[in-house]
Image (cartoon, rainbow, N blue to C red):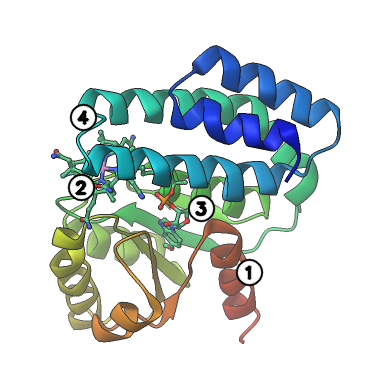
Amino acid sequence: MSEVRRRIREALANLDREGLLEALREALGSGVDVDAIVFEDMSWAMDEIGRRFETGEYFLADLLYAAEIFKEAMRILEPYMARKHSDRRSRGVVVLGTVKGDIHDIGKSLVATLLRLRGFQVIDLGVDVPPEKFVEAAKKHKPLIVGLSALLTTAIPSVRETIAKLREAGVPARIIVGGAALSEKTAKEVGADLYAENAVQAVKIVEKTMRGG
Ligand code: B1M
């Protein structure tokens, strides 16, 4: 891995805002792939921050600050993502949200950003979204896909309940789930149709599903 990518990882993991922004500008200037920065380096750093939180080295305030720095970095990176991923075709509606009991929004927002860049109309319901709100939005906007994000293992019952309520209400949309709390296996167990490990994969799967795949 290049020296500048290592600096991106270390700066974010160490909550060094200035160091991160400087390394990002340098990396972008030297042609480092924006997806590698977001989905490998910055995601690695967020996992590392989670590990430091688990061992007691970081506190809740540090996680909040990490999220703030991540979002600031995204404002620099988004134009580069737009250049790489943009596709102006209009492709239909996706309803998206983080399930009830879970307020993590970075991964879900990355999925929303990429889907919008690819021409989807995204109805982003935000975080801590109760099942009823997903059902209401699905009935109103008639999406082909509903996406649920969950990072907390304690939110898995919310994912299951949301999917059950969508099915009970007769919503015909395919349901995709993702987020650190879920895996291919748990996705099946909670009754989802589709699972994606990261935002790029989520968009590929949604596009394939929209094409009837
Ligand atoms: Co929290 N948190 N957090 N946290 N947090 C985790 C998730 C945790 C793993 C940290 C740890 O202990 N190692 C842990 C969960 C443990 C578990 O359940 N197994 C945890 C905990 C415990 C908590 C609290 C309970 C802490 C407390 O209060 N004591 C609390 C819960 C609050 C709540 O939700 N009710 C809490 C709070 C917070 C903050 C609010 C402070 C903050 C979030 C701020 C925000 O989002 N605006 C925060 C943060 C920052 C984290 C970590 C460090 C980073 C999360 C993140 O943004 N990652 C996280 C550690 C970790 O995840 N390893 C942690 C970067 C992001 C790009 O990745 O969101 O995974 P991610 O999204 C990826 C994929 O998962 C996927 O694509 C994305 C991009 O590729 N993906 C999808 C996500 N959604 C998808 C949907 C799809 C498809 C793919 O289709 C629809």
Q: Nearer the viewer, mark 4 or mark 3?
A: 4
Residue 126 image offset from top left, x and y in percent: 32, 44
Judge whether 83 appears above or below 60 on screen.
below
**Which quadrant of the view contains residue 190?**
bottom left
Q: Which mark is residue 111?
A: 3
Horizontal arrangement in the rendering, residue 132 relative to residue 120 (left or right): left
The label number, if any, that marks residue 60 in the structure image: 4
- Which amino acid type is marked by label 3? Val
For mark 4, does the 10 Å Cα neighbourhood hold few (<14), some (14 to 19), or many (20 or more) residues? few
Q: Is mark 3 within 8 Å of ligand 1?
A: yes
Contact (CB < 8 A) between labels 4 and 1?
no
Quadrant location of residue 139? bottom left
Residue picked out by circle 1: 204
Q: Kindly report the distance in space between the C-alpha atoms of the residues bearing marks 4 and 1.
A: 34 Å
Q: Nearer the viewer, residue 143 or 24?
A: 24
Which mark is nearer the camera, 4 or 1? Answer: 4
Which residue does the image show at 26% across and 60% down from the upper left?
A: 134
Which numbered dot is residue 128?
Answer: 2
Q: Alpha-carbon distance for marks 3 and 2?
A: 17 Å
User: Which mark sits nearer the N-terminus, 3 or 2?
Assistant: 3
Instruction: Choose the circle earlier in sequence order: 2 or 4.
Output: 4
Residue lying furthest top: 18
Q: Amino acid at mark 1?
A: Lys
